[in-house]
Amino acid sequence: ETGVTQTPRHLVMGMTNKKSLKCEQHLGHNAMYWYKQSAKKPLELMFVYNFKEQTENNSVPSRFSPECPNSSHLFLHLHTLQPEDSALYLCASSQHTDRTAEAFFGQGTRLTVV
Amino acid sequence: AQSVSQHNHHVILSEAASLELGCNYSYGGTVNLFWYVQYPGQHLQLLLKYFSGDPLVKGIKGFEAEFIKSKFSFNLRKPSVQWSDTAEYFCAVNARTGANNLFFGTGTRLTVIP
């Protein structure tokens, strides 16, 4: 248990569906991240939030829409996804003010787009 | 932007063999360097990190890594691997200043044969 909880663990959705991934941390961290983990590719940094403000959008298509209502919660809203979006989506958190601090990861949501 | 290269995709070793996994990064400024490990079915967790001081850093479970600035490298080593070291290993980097983004390599899968 890392203190970062992601739900659901598995999700299968059609290309016309709308769904959301949830991430929650109670570690007192003020930076939260979404990563995409695909086979044989680097972990792709998607979005970064520092103190609830989005500070990075790493050229992510608009069919992925993040939301950070407070420092403890992070969502990733999904709509009209493509099969190539199937991957493991990881959430992480860390202390923004300390670049040397460890990032804590959730166990991820395994997303399959059919 | 930073990038991280891990040239070994899959390494297979027998128990007690020595391990060295390569990691090279590209970035013109000063960086912090990390190795994360993902055991089968588990979340990513920190193995060790370097941010200043002695370029040879020691982590958990007998792992160490050496930062060689002139080579932009941060290779991971262990003198004698165990079956329980079977996992995926990820090198990561973030910049000391500017955007607080943690970039990862593609990962190296290590299989240790008993």
Image (spheres, coloured by chain):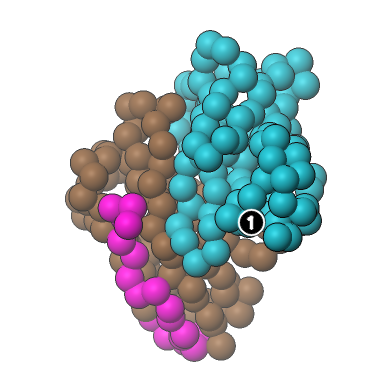
Q: Is residue B64 visible?
A: yes
Foreground pick, A61 / A113: A113
Q: Is residue A38 magenta?
A: no
Foreground pick, B19 / A62: B19
Q: State left or right for residue B69 relative to residue B48.
A: right
User: Where does the image place residue B9, in percent across and percent down from the top left?
Assistant: 76, 54
Q: Residue at x 61, y 80 (%)?
A: A83
Please state which amino acid type lies under the numbered disc 1. Answer: Trp
Against B57, is B90 above or below?
Answer: below
User: Where does the image place residue B14, in percent across and percent down from the top left?
Assistant: 77, 54
Q: Is residue A46 visible?
A: no
Task: Tell me the crowding category of disc 1: few under 14, some 14 to 19, or many 20 or more residues within 10 angstroms, Cα based.
Answer: some
Foreground pick, A112 / B82: B82
- Regarding mark 1 in the picture, which secondary structure is present there? helix
Quadrant of the snapshot with the N terminus of chain A? bottom left
How many circles with numbers are drawn on the protein? Answer: 1
Q: Chain of mark 1?
A: B
**Chain that the image shows in cyan:** B
User: Where does the image place residue A65, in percent across and percent down from the top left?
Assistant: 40, 63
Q: Is residue A3 magenta?
A: yes
Query: What range of the chain is rendered magenta?
Result: A1-18
* Residue pointed to by mark 1: B83
Against B107, is A84 above or below?
Answer: below
**Chain that the image shows in brown:** A
Q: State left or right for residue B90 relative to residue A65.
A: right
